[in-house]
Image: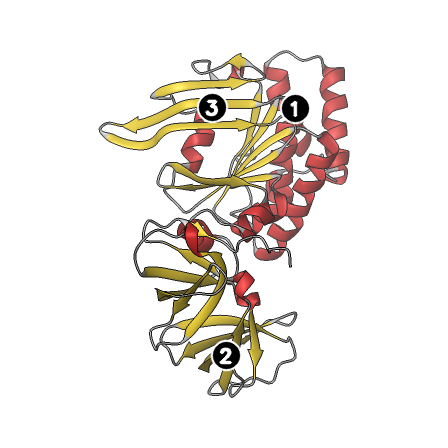
Amino acid sequence: MAGITLTGIDKRYGSVDVIRNLALAVEPGEFLVFLGPSGCGKSTLLRMIAGLEPVSGGEIRIADRDVTHLPPGARDVAMVFQHYALYPHMTVYDNMAFGLRNVGVAEAEIDRRVQEAARMLELVPLLQRKPVQMSGGQRQRVAIGRAVVKEPAAFLFDEPLSNLDAALRARTRIELARLHQRLKSTMVFVTHDQVEAMTLATRIVVMNQGRIEQIGRPMEIYRHPASRFVAGFIGSPAMNFIDVTRADGADGRAAVRLPDGTLVQTSVDAGSLPAGATLEMGVRPESLAIERSDAAGVLVGTAEVVERLGDQTHAHIALRSGGTVVAHAARDSEIMAGDVIGLRLDPAAVHLFDPSGAAHHAAARRAP
């Protein structure tokens, strides 16, 4: 197992700064995921670690060895790309063995590594097939196997599941998680898919416009997003956001008013909020409890769209106070488009975002 340390990393294309003064430590044996929208710099960062892109400034260390200016082959990493890039005229066995033969590894050792990787990835029955005879998921497993046989210090994955259909993506995700558990190797994975990040990562690095917005464990980022950007990017359906103004709260907790004047009490420490009245309230769909529309203390709206997904139901509700929110309903809910719906907020589940985009979460509960 090897750690990866990035210090003061800059990347420029001409006068355009893509990544600026980025610092990050990947712990040995962890599965770290770079997550963010297209163009945020995550793939560029991975390619700099691999040596496929030169850095404009800073230092990269792998296993405490300075590799900043070393060629890719001297960095002791293996990379799996979005496109499989298999040799079409070679069998699975030869595709996996090709790189080892190029560096003069003995045939007996090559066979041991290929057979071991094939067993791990359930490719043994396919070793004599050629890529054209396999499905997309099988080809991607071969590409992963080609990386595994190198026995590198670290694995780098650049959106390897993007070309697979939904069912194959789900299966291959599980295979990657099992592979990490078996190898216990350092893995760095790039994706724009938050489901992949949440299900695979030991830690997630959320990136935006060439900088790190937040680093943390999946549920830590989900429960306590550091910014408005992170809160909106993590979660499916996404967090609901409503423009609000500050009001007088109780017991040192902040209260806010919706556009129609409805008062909402939160559990956010009022003292943590900056001066000023304009805020944005965020609440996740599962924190909106559906109630009778005439019950006290509920928000009222009209269901516009109801998504029935089998295991859960999502109701898109236009609030009378303005704006639209998504709420989780019981999976067998009878809610229909056009129904008047009441929603109750859990004060402890309300997040507030100031004009800078910084997040403010529920304060710890006070002892009675």
Q: Tag 1's secondary structure?
A: helix
Q: Please, is residue 136 above or below residue 253 in the view? A: above
- Residue carrying label 2: 298
Q: Is residue 193 above or below residue 60?
A: below
Q: Is residue 23 above or below residue 37?
A: above
The residue located at (64%, 55%) in the rendering is 367
Q: Amino acid at mark 2?
A: Val
Viewer-nearest residue: 350 or 15? 350
Q: Is residue 134 visible?
A: no
Residue 130 position within the rendered picture, expressed as x and y whole percent measured from the top left: 63, 37
In 3D space, how far apart are the residues under numbered discs 2 and 3 (Cα atoms)?
A: 49 Å
Q: State which tag comes first along the sequence, 2 or 3.
A: 3
- Mark 2 to mark 1: distance in Å? 64 Å
Q: Quadrant of the N terminus?
A: top right
Q: Which residue in the protein does label 1 denote?
A: 97
Report the residue at 65% width, 24% height from top.
97
Front disc: 3 or 1: 3
Q: Position of residue 257 (x, y in %)?
A: 38, 70
Give the mark, 2 or 1, whose residue is nearer the N terminus. 1
Crowding around mark 3 (Cα neighbors within 10 Å: few <14, some 14 to 19, many 20+) is some
Q: Residue under circle 3?
A: 6
Residue at x 62%, y 44% (from the top left corner): 200
